[in-house]
Amino acid sequence: MKWRSLAITSAMLAALLSACSSEPPSEDQTQNVNTVNIENNDSAPAVDPANEQGEGETDAGQSTDRFPAGAYEGKVEGIAYGLGDLTEGITEELGEPDQMDYFAGGVYLSYPNVVFFSDAELDGENNIVDGTIKGMGFGTDNSLFGVTIGQPFEEIAVVLGDGYTMHTPDENVNNEFYAGMWSMEYRVGEYAVIFTAEEENGPTNAAYYEET
């Protein structure tokens, strides 16, 4: 199969992740890649403004009781492949991705509920030269560690705790994944969990789980 080429840029990444949640998976993909079914926390209580962190401030503590054990091992419940896993066999097990091309130094593979970012390459016939999964992206309405992407930062803090760092659009200006976005970052052992939004108090539009 000749893969559809997508010259992806940071401005197009949000659209790519949105596409992950806008189309239902095929029957084969449903059997292999399961969306994490976690209760939506839309009714979560508001965060006390007095306890909110300022821009760029960091709480060095890690909320070890807020993340599942698998989060410290690069794993997301219901997703067959995790951080550090080889890309070998991924298309055989999960099926052909909706989109596949280069971004941020390696090949990404887009499936209905997750985008895998890797350091793999493509050969002259667009076959994967195996590499390692370095990051995972999730679009709106998908769930990650108890948070539904679309919830604002204050609701995420209720779910995952206050051990996070906020970054402004100016601070993210050179980031390939979320340039110009607000971001909320948790450190989970050797990994980072990051939620992004166009506005500080608006809905989040993507989440990333990646190696640090």
Image (cartoon, rainbow, N blue to C red):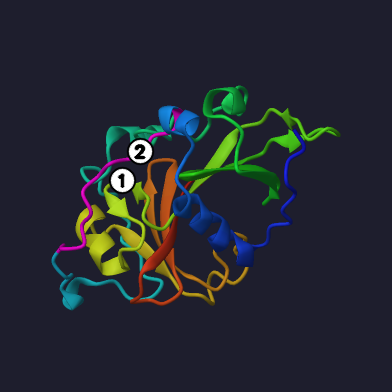
Q: Quadrant of the N terminus?
A: top right
From the viewer's perspective, is residue 97 above or below residue 21?
A: above
What main secondary structure does the magenta stretch of the protein show? loop
Residue named by callout 2: 71
Which range of residues does the magenta coloring cover?
A: 32-44
From the viewer's perspective, is residue 182 above or below residue 137?
A: below
Q: Amino acid at mark 1?
A: Phe
Q: Earlier in the sequence, mark 1 or mark 2?
A: 2
Q: Taking the image as drawn, is residue 138 in sight?
A: no
Disc 1 secondary structure class = loop
Q: CA distance from mark 1 to mark 2?
A: 8 Å
Say which mark, if any, is on residue 34. Answer: none
Are the residues tagged 1 and 2 within 8 Å (C-beta)?
A: yes
Q: Position of residue 56 (x, y in %)?
A: 41, 71
Q: Position of residue 24 (x, y in %)?
A: 45, 45
From the viewer's perspective, is residue 56 above or below residue 164?
A: below
- Please state which of the two labelled residues, at mark 1 or mark 2, is closer to the viewer: 1
Disc 2 secondary structure class = helix
Q: Amino acid at mark 2?
A: Ala
Residue named by callout 1: 145
Q: Residue at x 59, y 72 (%)?
A: 173
From the viewer's perspective, is residue 196 above or below residue 95?
A: below
Q: Residue at x 35, y 63 (%)?
A: 150
Q: Residue at x 67, y 51 (%)?
A: 104
Q: Position of residue 76 (x, y in %)?
A: 38, 37
Q: Residues within 10 Å of mark 1 (few under 14, many from 20)?
A: some
Could you say which quadrant of the image residue 132 lies in?
top right
Quick one: 147 or 173, which is closer to the camera? Answer: 147
Q: Is residue 37 magenta?
A: yes
Q: Taking the image as drawn, is residue 105 in sight?
A: yes
